[in-house]
Image (tube, helix red, strand yellow):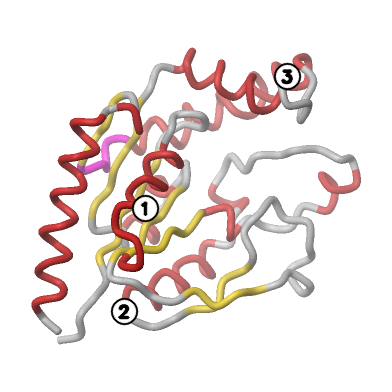
Amino acid sequence: MEKESIVIGFAGGIGGGKSTLAARIEKEFGDDATIIYMDHFRKYQPESIAEGMLIIPNAPDEFNIDLMVRCVSELKSGKDSPFPIYGFSSFSDEDRPWVTIKTKPIIILNGELLFAIPEIRDLIDIKVYVDIDADVRIMRRIHTQVAQNKLSLDDFIEQYITDDKPAHDTYVEPSKKFADIIIPEGAYNSIAREMLICMLRERLRAYKAND
């Protein structure tokens, strides 16, 4: 039987702190862990580039799911895998640069919609939903997108009402039921973070015992 890497996934609303929590887990395990962002697999959107817009993908069909499943499956099975460069897509699919990601004992996935897509959800061994009050998430996003001049306040409000909130209510919030662990307050919940680290240490110990 082939030894598989441990795949842990962090999902939840935008601005909830899942990226911070995922980064802390990666830092804790150093060379034994690598982090993969779902935005690696965002589809090319030339109209948003032409208009200078910052568009956050809100629905599963805005991602190349087949490619993500292939890449994560390869990493989980112990193989290095080529990945498209992370970032909001500014290249056509043909011109997008790629990099080879080395497999590690712990594979960390980070993305709002991870649990809403069955093919990806099935690859995740530990599903963590980062749950935080919507008002807090909105204020954090105002800080990052409006205060940093990425969007005007009017544009932010329009995007939130017409795109972000409906997508959250349709895809992200319902996917919470698939989570193995729900962490309120995200990276600031030190007790939950330490429990998660302890669980991963045990699994990592078992993984290395099979060498």
Disc 2 and disc 3: Cα gap in Å?
43 Å
Which is nearer the eye, 56 or 118?
56
Which is nearer the eye, 24 or 166?
24
Disc 2 and disc 1: Cα gap in Å?
22 Å
Quadrant where the N terminus sits is bottom left
Give the total number of marks visible in the rendering: 3
Q: Residues within 10 Å of mark 1 (few under 14, many from 20)?
A: some
Residue for badge 3: 158
Q: Residue furthest right?
A: 50
Q: Which sits earlier in the primary sequence, circle 3 or circle 1? A: 1
Q: Residues within 10 Å of mark 3 (few under 14, many from 20)?
A: few
Q: Left or right: 193 with respect to 54?
A: left
Residue for badge 2: 77
Residue for badge 1: 27
The x, y position of residue 176, in whole percent, is 31, 35
What stretch of residues is rendered in magenta? 176-180
Disc 3 and disc 1: Cα gap in Å?
36 Å
Image point (90%, 47%), residue name: 50
Residue type, numbered disc 2: Ser
The x, y position of residue 183, in whole percent, is 27, 31
Which is nearer the eye, 44 or 185?
185
